[in-house]
Image (cartoon, rainbow, N blue to C red):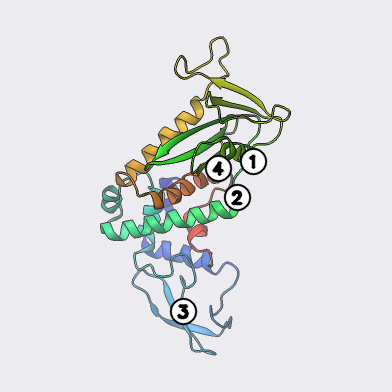
Amino acid sequence: MSILKLAKIINTNARAAQKFQTETWKRGFGCVQCGSIRAWKHRKLKNGLQKYRCEDCHHVFSDQSWTILRWNKARIDKVAVVNHLPKMTVRELAKQSELNKNTVERLMRLIRKTKGKLYQAAGPPELAGVVEMDETMMAKQWFWGAIERKTGKAIVEMIPNRTETILSAKIWKYVKEESLIITDELKSYQPHPRFFGHATVNHSKEFVRTGCRAIHTNSIESLWRQLKRRINHACNGVKLEHIQDYINEYFYTKNYDQNLKPTFFPLYCRKI
């Protein structure tokens, strides 16, 4: 969804709250505790959403109870703005959304974890055709990556070392048989010649094999640059324990957003 389309939907907080309510109760209205439909309006939350009181079990709930945003107090239109401007820094997002820095950091952490969980639930893609592979170091830890050249689908995982046992296991797990694997000349890459084609590039002499423009690892190298730039731009680097969350969010957007096209409201009105 573009910023222009988002602005048409949430030009006021009331319209944003109405859209949130429509998506939340898409499968039917009912008490989140007992399921009864005998519930009446209680009062409104500060962010414009409605609270209800169940007549049967006397439980008080709201439009965002049991959703991803169940503890959120910020206005829904401002939260949507934070969600759709992910490439800005925390300070820039706070200025654009008119929220304080701590609130923006909390929302960005929530967005990151939500997309990361969706990425893990969807599962990593299976790579086929021409697949480029490489390793890089972030926060003093090795990461292995592979990208399918035709579609751009990619996988990045943390690895303890670059031994043949570890890298061969990754190839057998994520790459389909009869694919062409392109790597540098690291000796640990030894895919079985019966099932995988294997081409290498000597980076100490060249970045594209002389006389064959198709043999290179430029796609995976570009992926490393984009990923590191995204992490460093977000908060001037992150701790090792948080890097995988950033990676999961990045690849959920890269692998699945173009196909599923999730928008703000279906994503944050999900029942959990």
Quarter of the figure with residue 18: bottom left
Q: Which mark is residue 126?
A: 1
Q: Which residue lies under the disc numbered 2? A: 123
| Relative vertical location of residue 234 with respect to residue 17 in this rendering, above or below | above
Q: Which mark is residue 255?
A: 4
| Relative vertical location of residue 50 with respect to residue 113 in this rendering, above or below | below
Q: Of the residues tagged 4 and 3, which is closer to the observer?
A: 4
Which amino acid, mark 4? Answer: Asn
Is mark 3 in CB contact (under 8 Å) with mark 1?
no
Q: Which residue lies under the disc numbered 3? A: 61
Q: Residue at 57%, 40% (x, y): give it.
A: 166
Q: Is residue 186 left or right of residue 46?
A: right
- Indicate the position of residue 44 as horizontal and vertical percent values: 38, 76
- Secondary structure state at the residue bearing disc 3: strand
Mark 2 or mark 4: name the one nearer the start of the chain. 2
Quarter of the figure with residue 14: bottom left
| Relative vertical location of residue 117 with respect to residue 70 in this rendering, above or below | above
Tell me how far mark 2 sits from mark 4, CA to CA.
Answer: 10 Å
Label 1 Cα neighbours within 10 Å, binned few <14 / some 14-19 / many ≥20: few
* Between 207 and 52, the one nearer to me in the picture: 207
- Indicate the position of residue 67 as horizontal and vertical percent values: 49, 68
- Indicate the position of residue 202 as horizontal and vertical percent values: 50, 18
